Image: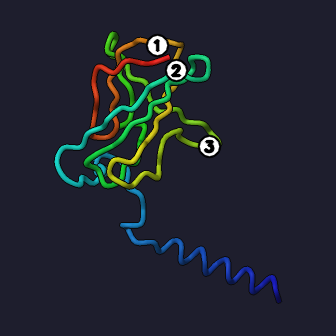
Amino acid sequence: MKFARSLAAVLILLAAAGCASKEAVRPDGPEAEPEAISGTPRIEVLYIRMTGGGEFVDIRFRMYGIRKYDPEPSNSYVIDEATGEKFYITFLRRIGRLATTKGDKDGSIQFLNIKNREGKLKAGSLITVVAGPARQEHVVIGE
């Protein structure tokens, strides 16, 4: 009898979860642009450092002009200004993307962790940081 009640409760919960409104589902694709607050979205890079023995680039920045920034690999990356090559957010299989997902105040500190493929980026390299619709050019990687 307890099993039947538990099974019925689970089925009711699953049915309710499947009835989520369209707004509750996270959109993907070009329509998933962040919601602007006012003015042009911009970022202020606080620092960029090589971490993990040069395997990663750690970027800390403030985001202005966007209500909620949700980093997606397709629109958050770094461009090496010398070669034009793009480096994307690190994605770990069990953890997910290594980037801020909860900063929802204008001017809150965000972070991105970028995988430095084959050690191509070096301390002192000039890069462009792209975070959603905002970008900051000519940023030097620190040690």
- How crowded pointer 3 is (Cα within 10 Å; few <14, some 14-19, many 20+) is rated as few
Residue assigned mark 1: 123
Rendering coords of residue 58 (x, y %): 50, 29
Q: Count of labels shown?
A: 3
Upstream in the sequence, badge 3 or badge 2? 2
> In the displayed structure, would residue 23 be above or below residue 38?
below
Rendering coords of residue 71 (x, y %): 41, 43
What residue lies at 82% left-to-right and 86% top-to-bottom? 2
Rendering coords of residue 49 (x, y %): 49, 23
Q: Mark 1 is on which residue type?
A: Ala
Residue assigned mark 2: 50
Rendering coords of residue 96 (x, y %): 57, 42
Mark 3 or 2, closer to the camera: 2
What residue lies at 53% left-to-right and 72% top-to-bottom? 17
What residue lies at 61% left-to-right and 17% top-to-bottom? 53
Which element carries disc 1, helix, strand or loop?
loop
Which element carries disc 2, helix, strand or loop?
strand
Upstream in the sequence, badge 1 or badge 2? 2
Residue found at the very far left of the displayed protein: 39
Upstream in the sequence, badge 3 or badge 1? 3
The N terminus appears in which quarter of the rendering? bottom right
Measured Cα–Cα span from mark 1 to mark 2: 7 Å
Front in this rendered view, residue 69 or 47: 47
Q: Which mark is drawn over residue 95?
A: 3
Residue found at the very far bottom of the displayed protein: 1
Front in this rendered view, residue 122 or 4: 122
Q: Mark 2 is on which residue type?
A: Met
Which element carries disc 3, helix, strand or loop?
loop
> In the displayed structure, would residue 6 be above or below residue 86?
below
81 on left or right of 58? left
Mark 3 or 1, closer to the camera: 1
- Asked if labels 2 and 1 touch by Cβ distance under 8 angstroms, the answer is yes
